[in-house]
Amino acid sequence: MTDELEAWIGRRRTQAAVLDPELARRYAGAMGAPLDVEAHFPPLGHWAYFNDVVGPGELGPDGHPRRGIFLPPVALPRRMFASATFRFEGPLALREAAELVSTIADIRRRSGRTGELVLLDVTRDLSQAGALKLSETQTIVYREQARPRRQSRTPARAGTGSCGRRPSSTSSATPPPPSTATASTTIRPTSARKKATRTWWSTGRSPPPGCSTWRAAPPAGR
């Protein structure tokens, strides 16, 4: 870990907000929780508050506020929410003022199968009227850019269908007309074929991408 990142440990930020019931209600609707938030505050509903609002020029490539405002300027491009732990001390009061104190508790470097990692712990203490209501520790992981996957498919040979197999006398390069399609609306691969040479039962739909070898749908019960 560089001294530049280590110097951010202990950095603190304080935010204030009034807990508007409408924000909690919108959060509850998005999470499928009861909308009567004054009777049943939604689980983890405090996440509806204290979200950063910045202009376009202050956004990073990951859609979060750019690093270096509160979170340290980690050079790794990808960001993941890894985990959170909570300690609940008391219920939150809607329509009342609240204060959130966020602190960068730890920064550590790791190495994994995907390359270098930087793990960041942020503690968040939420209080109302001077009394602690909940304490949370979020762990954020920064990762290297994803490596491109190797192409496993081989190009189809001339004279074969797009699935890599030569059309047989019982198949054609195009699906049958809708009038010959079965009533079923599902398309399923035959289990006996390998992935690169799948045959698809015709149901009147277009063939799946990369496969133009078709058969008539099997009789019912097969």
Image (cartoon, rainbow, N blue to C red):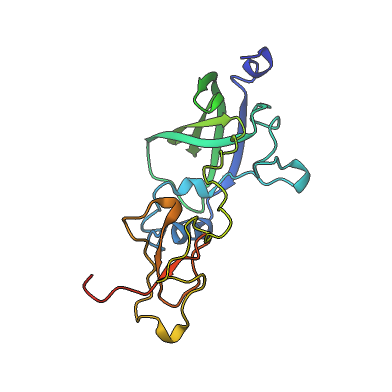
Quarter of the rendering occupied by the C terminus: bottom left
Q: In this view, which residue lies farthest toward the left?
A: 221
Q: Is residue 1 left or right of residue 36?
A: right
Q: Residue at x 56, y 60 (%)?
A: 159
Q: Nearer the viewer, residue 3 or 167?
A: 167
Q: Is residue 18 left or right of residue 63?
A: left
On the image, the x and y values in percent for residue 141 come to 53, 30
Q: Give the vertical position of 182 relative to 25 (above or below).
A: below
Name which quarter of the figure residue 198 lies in: bottom left
Name which quarter of the figure residue 12 lies in: top right
Q: Nearer the viewer, residue 126 or 62?
A: 62
On the image, the x and y values in percent for residue 99 come to 55, 38
Q: Give the vertical position of 190 relative to 47 (above or below).
A: below
Q: In this view, which residue lies farthest toward the bottom?
A: 179
Q: Residue at x 37, y 74 (%)?
A: 216
On the image, the x and y values in percent for residue 83 come to 44, 34
Q: Give the vertical position of 46 relative to 178 (above or below).
A: above
Q: Nearer the viewer, residue 14 or 5?
A: 5
Q: Is residue 64 left or right of residue 109?
A: right
Q: Residue at x 59, y 20 (%)?
A: 10
On the image, the x and y values in percent for residue 76 come to 64, 29
Q: In this view, which residue lies farthest toward the right?
A: 57
